[in-house]
Image (cartoon, helix red, strand yellow):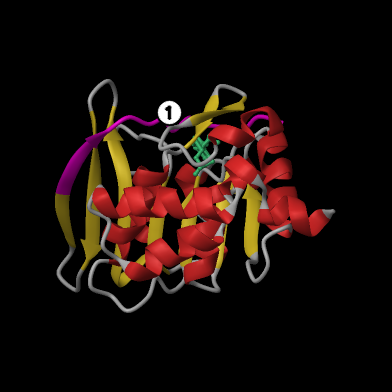
Amino acid sequence: MMNSALAGIGMTSLRTRMRMIDKLRRQGVRNEAVLEAMATVPRHIFVDEALNSRAYEDMALPLGFGQTISQPYVVARMIEALLGARPGLGKTLEIGTGCGYQTAVLGKLTRDVYSVERIAPLLARAEQHLKRIPGVSARLRHADGSIGFPEAAPFDSIIVAAAARQVPPALLQQLAVEGCLILPLGDKEQYLCHIQRTLQGFAETRLEKVRFVPLLSGIES
Ligand code: SAH
């Protein structure tokens, strides 16, 4: 029962998932490790059962609490940019666990994943979803991600799934030298910002326009 639900049937089958991967390739995603990770994580596990049949369409889907699961292309693009030419992600911090889908993809790429979510019931659900994904373990925390995850710092990679107006200073502080941070920046108009920490400071690159829910402060229980 459990296994067949994981494998999926029809609109949630492996074949449907592979169509999503083909589309990501056509959209320009090139990193094979990222594509492979996304091919092995069943996205339908992470969305409401009523939305299962839409889980592999390239769109954001509602998660409840006014939040959305990120579009597959955006997840792929951000992780690909985060990796850049590096051989791996290393110790990784995710801000905005949401349903845990991106956490699972990160978990397929690195063994050391930390993820912070400010809405407690979403985090509890993400934890349940992630238990169903073999080989993935992530340390989850209910907190305001703007303060990062100080005890586990420094991080080689930091990825933020909600749009900030400015880069939260704690995240810059918690980035290892040679580490990379990717986040959506802006309010009405948002773009992806890639930041690499060097010995001299921070090198910032502006990538494409995006649309994310806002990074909010404080927590909700
Ligand atoms: N990667 C997630 C994206 C969810 S949407 C997924 O694919 O499901 C962004 C998430 O960021 C939401 O769950 C929202 O509650 C969370 N969020 C917003 N501001 C936050 C903050 N300051 N700290 C932690 N999480 C935050």
Q: In this view of the protein, which residue sits in the foreground, 11 or 98? A: 11
Label 1 sits on residue: 213
Q: Is residue 157 left or right of residue 109?
A: left
In the image shown, does 13 or 81 lie closer to the viewer? 13
Query: Which residue is depicted at the point 49% across and 72% down?
Result: 110
Left or right placement of residue 116 versus residue 70 in this view: right
Up/down of 167 relative to 54, above or below: below
Element under disc 1 = loop
Q: Is residue 104 above or below residue 60?
A: below
Residue 6 seen from this side: yes
Specify whether residue 174 is in view: no
Locate residue 200, reporting x and y percent: 14, 69
Of 124 and 30, which appears nearest the observer? 30
The quarter holding residue 35 reads bottom left
Mark 1 CB in 8 Å range of ligand 1?
yes
- Which residue is rendered at x = 59% and y = 48% of the image? 100
What x and y, as percent, mark residue 150? 52, 60
Q: Measured from the top left, where is residue 50 in percent x and y?
A: 68, 27
Q: Position of residue 145 (x, y in %)?
A: 51, 45
The residue segment tinted magenta is: 206-221
For the point 54% across and 33% down, the residue is 54
Amino acid type indicated by mark 1: Val
Quarter of the rendering containing residue 198 = bottom left
